[in-house]
């Protein structure tokens, strides 16, 4: 009886299905065809496999490159520390190892090139702004990138820079500035306080190579300007001592009282080479005085007279000319080495622990003093 009875779900399903068909106007649901879907998947099964393979290969390459770069950075750091310790530097240099990949170079026991930059090396009175060197054909002593004991550098070349900015700070003390004067010359110009007075100073320094690793200077052409009245050059040569400036000499020749006071000093007359008769006539006749002092030769000869001995023997004359006797006394006590020492300097490159390192060409440009460096057979880290 139960099997003959109607299933109440049939009416429910039939009604829902009929209503859905009437309401939506869609076809009745059919079970999916699994055979068609399997064909579509089979055609696309190859693509994910290739993508996965490429991802794995790319990941492996990235890991290898990262390992190579990490080993490179580690080796550069260790080399920097070893160079700092072996050459007793204040700061660790910057080391850059060239070539790729790095690990294959280490496995072969050699490096293509290494660039080393060492900033701010103390060198007596001055600081070398930068020493840059590129080493080629380096043989490594070690068992791997983490156990490098040292290296042999067959060839190295580079450059040393001593900048004018550092020289101005260390030698000039913000009062004297250094500039390029020529291929191998440097000019110092500024002010110095002497005898409680600020005097303008100029000096020339000749740059020369000293030995294999040193640079030194010889200072000459030192000149101290006492306003626009006179210039003082330390030394005993005719061009040195105390001399009137052309402007000051021209002004004195226009002042009758001042030029007459100078002509009354026999030492000045003798150095001017003026006959006594001409001097006597000029002292008593204004026209002859102007005629004598107005000659171009007289003005030139007046600036050539060294007034040191004359002024000390005739202090009143010095006062008439507007010069301070106490300042002149202080200047005459200064010797050439005492003044030149304020502008002179010398330095030596650090001696390498092994091999040879020497300076080559030395030149001066707008930025400072540059010298080429070369070396052979340098041992680092041993």
Image (tube, grey):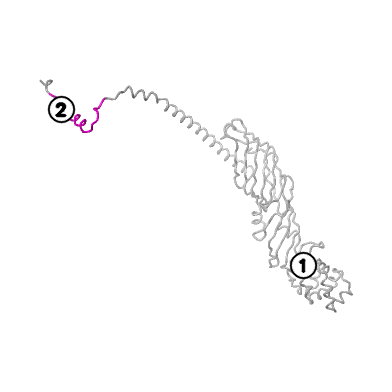
- Residue range in magenta is 6-30
Q: Quadrant of the N terminus?
A: top left
Residue 172 pos. (x, y %): 67, 58
**Mark 1 sits on what residue?**
246
In the image, what residue occupies the spot 60% across and 47% down? 91
**Callout 1 touching callout 2 (CB < 8 Å):** no
The answer to if 15 sits in the magenta stretch is yes
Looking at this view, is 308 or 88 the one in front? 308
Q: Is residue 92 above or below residue 151?
A: below
Given residues 1 and 368, the one toward you in this image is 1
User: Residue 3 falls in which quadrant of the image?
Assistant: top left
Which residue in the structure is indicated by mark 2? 11
Dominant SS of magenta comes to helix
* Residue occupying the point 65% across, 42% down: 133
Image side of residue 151 versus residue 63, left or right? right
What percent of the width, then of the height, locates residue 145? 57, 34
Circle 1 sits in a helix, a strand or a loop, which is it? helix
Q: Circle 2 sits in a helix, a strand or a loop, which is it?
A: helix
Which residue is the extreme one toward the left? 1
Question: Which is nearer the eye, 129 or 7?
Answer: 7
């Amino acid at each position: 009886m139960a099997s003959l009875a109607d299933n109440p779900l049939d009416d429910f399903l039939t009604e829902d299905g009929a209503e859905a068909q009437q309401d939506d106007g869609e076809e009745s649901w059919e079970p999916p065809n699994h055979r068609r879907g399997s064909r579509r998947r089979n055609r696309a099964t190859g693509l994910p496999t290739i993508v996965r393979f490429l991802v794995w290969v790319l990941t492996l390459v990235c890991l290898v490159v990262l390992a190579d770069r990490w080993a490179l950075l580690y080796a550069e750091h260790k080399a920097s520390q070893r160079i700092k310790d072996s050459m007793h530097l204040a700061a660790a240099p910057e080391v850059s190892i060239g070539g790729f990949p790095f690990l294959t170079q280490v496995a072969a026991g050699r490096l293509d090139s290494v660039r080393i930059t060492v900033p701010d090396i103390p060198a007596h009175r001055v600081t070398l702004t930068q020493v840059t060197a590129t080493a080629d054909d380096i043989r490594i002593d070690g068992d791997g990138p983490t156990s490098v004991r040292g290296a042999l550098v067959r060839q190295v070349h580079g450059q040393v820079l001593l900048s004018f900015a550092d020289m101005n700070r260390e030698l000039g003390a913000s009062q004297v500035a250094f500039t390029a004067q020529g291929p191998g010359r440097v000019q110092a110009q500024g002010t110095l306080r002497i005898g409680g007075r600020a005097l303008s100073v100029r000096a020339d320094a000749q740059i020369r190579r000293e030995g294999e690793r040193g640079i030194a200077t010889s200072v000459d052409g030192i000149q101290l300007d006492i306003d626009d009245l006179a210039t003082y050059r330390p030394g005993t040569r005719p061009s040195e001592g105390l001399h009137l400036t052309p402007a000051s000499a021209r002004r004195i020749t226009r002042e009758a009282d001042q030029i007459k006071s100078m002509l009354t000093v026999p030492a000045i007359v003798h150095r001017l080479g003026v006959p006594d008769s001409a001097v006597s006539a000029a002292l008593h006749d204004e026209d002859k005085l102007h005629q004598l002092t107005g000659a171009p030769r007289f003005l030139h000869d007046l600036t050539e007279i060294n007034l040191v001995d004359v002024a000390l023997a005739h202090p009143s004359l010095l006062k008439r000319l507007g010069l301070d006797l106490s300042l002149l006394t202080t200047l005459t006590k200064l010797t050439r080495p005492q003044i030149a020492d304020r502008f002179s300097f010398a330095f030596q490159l650090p001696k390498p622990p092994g091999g040879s390192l020497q300076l080559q060409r030395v030149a001066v440009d707008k930025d400072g003093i540059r010298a080429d460096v070369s070396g052979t057979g340098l041992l680092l880290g041993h």
